[in-house]
Amino acid sequence: MSERILNFSAGPGAIPVPVLERARDEMVNWQGAGMSVMEMSHRGKAFLSIAQATEEAARKLMGIPSNYKVLFLQGGASLQFTMLANAFLNTRAEFVVTGAWGQKALQAGKMVGESHVTWDGKAHNYDRAPKFDSLDIDSAPDFVHITMNETIQGVDFLTDPDINENIVCDMSSCIASRPFDVSKYSLIYAGAQKNLGPSGVTLVILSEDFLATQKEGLHPMLDYRVQAENESMYNTPPCWGIYVMGLVFQHWLDFGGLEAVAAHNEKKAKLIYDAIDGSGGFYRGHAQPENRSLMNIPFVLPDESLTEKFLAETKANQMVELKGHRSVGGCRASVYNAFPMEGAKALADFMGHFARQNG
Ligand SMILES: Cc1ncc(COP(=O)(O)O)c(C=O)c1O
């Protein structure tokens, strides 16, 4: 795949090449239907079979229990910030803020009702996540919101919550990167464009018990019950995204499931963290070691001019999108599920070489 560049983008991120190839092969004439998935009626037999296959593969890959709904919505994870608060915030919601996306979820919550900050990593410049058992949650909130992996800060809880409350979790940047226990959550949401497929579709997994607590009288498009009753087809769904997502789920099932995906991701991330830790302080990672994300690895170099030089040289070596988010600075390597091992190795080798030349 020499024409493929090493894409370290934080999102949209890399999609498995066999998925792209299959989508290409089926682009003009999906399985003899004589038309593309983009041209089909979403109410027709062909597309209904695609949507069903995507849901089944999602359930299998992520071990989603039968008392959870699987929805394919639109508006990205950003609309979920508002939609979930609008639907479930009655008296008070709690927010555990571990970075920039958690702050956004909190802001959306505040526009709807009482939104209390349980824990905020600001004092530590968002370089860590709390231990779940250390959280002091005021009694009976409507839900507790967490961001499992903060994409900008590269901070991940790395474990499922074990809290006897309704946990609502933004998993946009780590979903399906390792096994997780859906039953520990009341609602999980993720924009597809990092680990699941193209942008434009948002995966929502929610428990039927939690759904039963939803407010009445919501606008149908913002009503999870309406979306569930209509199997995500209250209006025209993001058909192409649902189709590609199904191919991505099947790809990782064939790869060996989430245990195998996790082992692969751990190896990839270790290559880069080892390059940081082995550089004698030339590179400094942002996250504390116990919360290091396996998906997003922000790091800084000694100064701005070295950062610029590093970015120019990596680009010349077919490694792109390594510039860090402006709020953290430096560089960020995003290595989602579909990012290849050789790419992580190439970056780690280059980092070693660059530090020796410029350190
Ligand atoms: C953790 C997290 N939450 C939410 C979002 C926003 O997602 P979207 O662009 O799908 O609204 C992002 C996007 O990068 C993200 O990384």
Image (cartoon, rainbow, N blue to C red):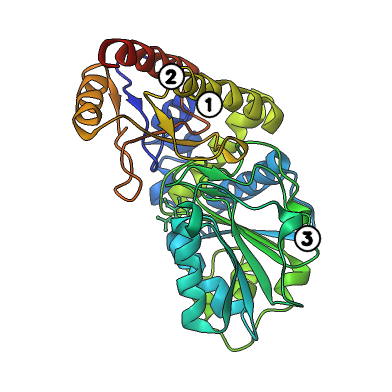
Q: Quadrant of residue 78?
A: bottom left
Identify the amino acid type marked 1.
Ala
Circle 1 sits in a helix, a strand or a loop, which is it?
Answer: helix
Q: Measured from the top left, where is residue 200 in percent x and y? A: 41, 54
Question: Observer-nearest residue: 124 or 113?
Answer: 124
- Give the image location of residue 119, x and y in percent: 60, 64
Q: Which residue is mark 2?
A: 280
Q: Earlier in the sequence, mark 2 or mark 1?
A: 1
Say which mark, if any, is on residue 269.
1
Q: Is residue 190 left or right of 281 when viewed as pictured?
A: right
Residue labelled 2 has its Cβ within 8 Å of some atom of ligand 1: no
Q: Earlier in the sequence, mark 3 or mark 1?
A: 3
Do the numbered discs 2 and 1 sit on residues whose CB atoms are within 8 Å?
A: no
Sequence-wise, the earlier of marks 2 and 3 is 3
x and y, in percent, of residue 110 in the image: 49, 79
Would you say 95 lies left or right of 357 here? right
State yes or no: discs 2 and 3 in contact (Cβ < 8 Å).
no
Is residue 41 visible to us here?
A: no
- The residue nearer to you, when weighing 282 against 149, is 282
Mark 3: amino acid: Ile
3D distance between C-alphas at marks 2 and 3: 39 Å
Would you call the spot at circle 2 few (<14 residues within 10 Å), some (14-19), or many (20 or more)? Answer: few
Tell whether circle 1 marks a residue whose Cβ is less than 8 angstroms from ligand 1: no
State how far apart marks 3 and 1 are (Cα): 28 Å
Query: Three-letter amino acid code at disc 2?
Result: Gly
On the rendering, which quadrant does ligand 1 occupy? bottom left
Q: Locate residue 138 relative to residue 105 in the image: left or right.
A: right
- Residues 77 and 358: in front is 358
The numbered disc on residue 163 is 3
